[in-house]
Amino acid sequence: MEAAQAGSLPRVGITSLLWGNPSDDLLAPWLEEVRSIGYEGVSGFSDWGWQSHVADPQGFRKHLDAAGLQLASIIAPLDLNFDRYRRVFDLMNEASCENLIILGGFGREESEFRLVIDMMSYLTTIAKARGVRITYHNHTDNTGETFAQFCRIMDGLSNDRSVMVDVGHATKDFVDVEMSQRTTVVLDRYENDISMIELKDFKPETGLNTVLGQGEANLRAVAEKVKAMAYTGWLVVEQNGDATMRENGSASRCARESRAVVRDLFGI
């Protein structure tokens, strides 16, 4: 877990997904917009939008610096492209970012859980030498979908593991846990290993494209736990978004509404 310092508070970021992953000429104005709404950092996807920026770490950092923002995390697929991971490490090192979120793994046979664990272990080894923490994303339809499945992966990793949780996916997918506890069960079990928390909401009508505070996720319980843990890492807001929102400006409105909820619940 991020070590607490006197007077320190979590930092609040947002992913690019809500806006459809702006990149290239759209990156700079998007970063300015994010900063104007009140976020301190951003997260994006190595293979779903930011490929050109992974290839130009210094240029990407200059855009961040110009907007006064930090890079909270990068999300990358779970695969065998080790050279791509090393290029992502270059970008992260340039931007002083520590969190690489791994998304993927399809299949739930015992041997497939083992493969995911082995991959995560190997990536942890090569990332650690670069000052990067590898964390596995709990996600719908992936190997670590339910709480029990997620724990099988986390418990298979070494003691220097890093753990993140997407509380929206937890609300939707942790069907093996009481609803009121789904957002905090990972925080309770892996309190000393938490490196990032992704704030997302969910309700059946709007799925994971739900503004914070308008769904079923027990965000108040997350806020109480974060304060009790003295957690000082990143809280990253993510709302999936859709094409209509990107056309009519709703993405900015939703991001602003979610930021207000974080301010109200977490006091930051």
Image (cartoon, helix red, strand yellow):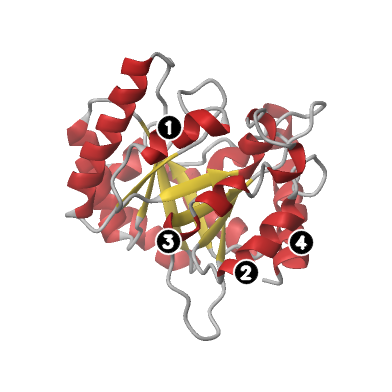
Calculate the distance from the C-alpha at mark 3 to the C-alpha at mark 4.
23 Å
Q: Secondary structure at mark 4?
A: helix
Residue at coordinates 38% horizontally, 51% vertically from top-left? 162
Q: Nearer the viewer, residue 113 or 42?
A: 113
In primary-sequence order, the first of circles 2 and 1 is 1
Q: Quadrant of residue 250?
A: top right
The numbered disc on residue 228 is 2
Does the CB distance between marks 4 and 1 fall below 8 Å? no
Instruction: Look at the image and tell me whether residue 34 can be seen.
Output: yes
- The amino acid at mark 1 is Arg
Calculate the distance from the C-alpha at mark 4 to the C-alpha at mark 2.
21 Å
Q: Nearer the viewer, residue 83 or 230?
A: 230
Which residue in the structure is indicated by mark 1?
Answer: 152
Determine the residue located farthest toward the bottom in the rendered image.
Answer: 6
Q: Secondary structure at mark 2?
A: helix
In primary-sequence order, the first of circles 3 and 1 is 3
Q: Quadrant of residue 202?
A: top right
Calculate the distance from the C-alpha at mark 2 to the C-alpha at mark 3.
31 Å
Instruction: Look at the image and tell me whether residue 37 can be seen.
Output: no
Residue 268 vertical placement versus 32 (above, below): below
Residue 45 on image: x %, y %: 43, 39
- The amino acid at mark 3 is Leu
Residue 146 vertical placement versus 8 (above, below): above
- The amino acid at mark 2 is Ala
Does the CB distance between marks 3 and 1 fall below 8 Å? no
